[in-house]
Amino acid sequence: MSSSRKGPGAAPGRPARPSALKGVFERASPSHDAAEATVGEYSFQSGHTSGAVVVYGMLAYGAIRLTPRRWHLRIVLAAATLIVAVGCGRVWLRVHWASDVIARFVSGAGWLASCVMFLERVRERADRAR
């Protein structure tokens, strides 16, 4: 992936950019004869997956803050479905091993939790200042 491609919002702040970790681990992508997608880089870890966790997770967080409680479960399930679909797609396209995708689910969830905790703290301080 080109270094000029950056995601919006909280995504660029993800710690340990996938390209930096790929060079450390140097894990080859799954080998196959007819790939649906071609990758010229190492496999570990899946940046698409962590990006999906952070972007869809933040969209869900924003939607939850703005909608009535009865919609919250549906919003979380929709975001989780999209996130899992991205991860499964990376494995199905044979550009990442399942362990690469799982590793980025975990690291993306950690970054998402950090972003949500930060925003909640800011919101609490703003509420106290009123």
Image: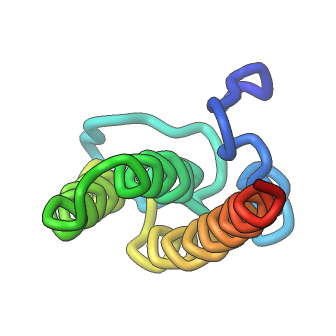
Q: Which quarter of the figure has residue 6?
A: top right
The residue positioned 35% from the left and 35% from the top of the image is 37
The answer to whether residue 98 is left or right of residue 67 is right
x and y percentages locating residue 51 in the rendered image = 54, 49
Q: Nearer the viewer, residue 36 or 116?
A: 116
Residue that extends furthest to the top in the rendered view of this protein: 4
The answer to whether residue 94 is left or right of residue 97 is left
Q: Report the label total.
A: 0
The answer, for residue 89, to whether it is visible in the render is: no
The answer to whether residue 96 is left or right of residue 32 is right
The answer, for residue 121, to whether it is visible in the render is: yes
Q: Residue 77, relative to residue 82: is it above or below?
A: below
x and y percentages locating residue 29 in the rendered image = 52, 58
The residue positioned 20% from the left and 56% from the top of the image is 78
The residue positioned 47% from the left and 59% from the top of the image is 53
Quadrant position of the N terminus in the picture: top right
Q: Nearer the viewer, residue 38 or 60?
A: 60
The answer to whether residue 31 is left or right of residue 85 is right
x and y percentages locating residue 128 in the rendered image = 78, 66
The residue positioned 28% from the left and 48% from the top of the image is 93
x and y percentages locating residue 80 in the rendered image = 28, 64
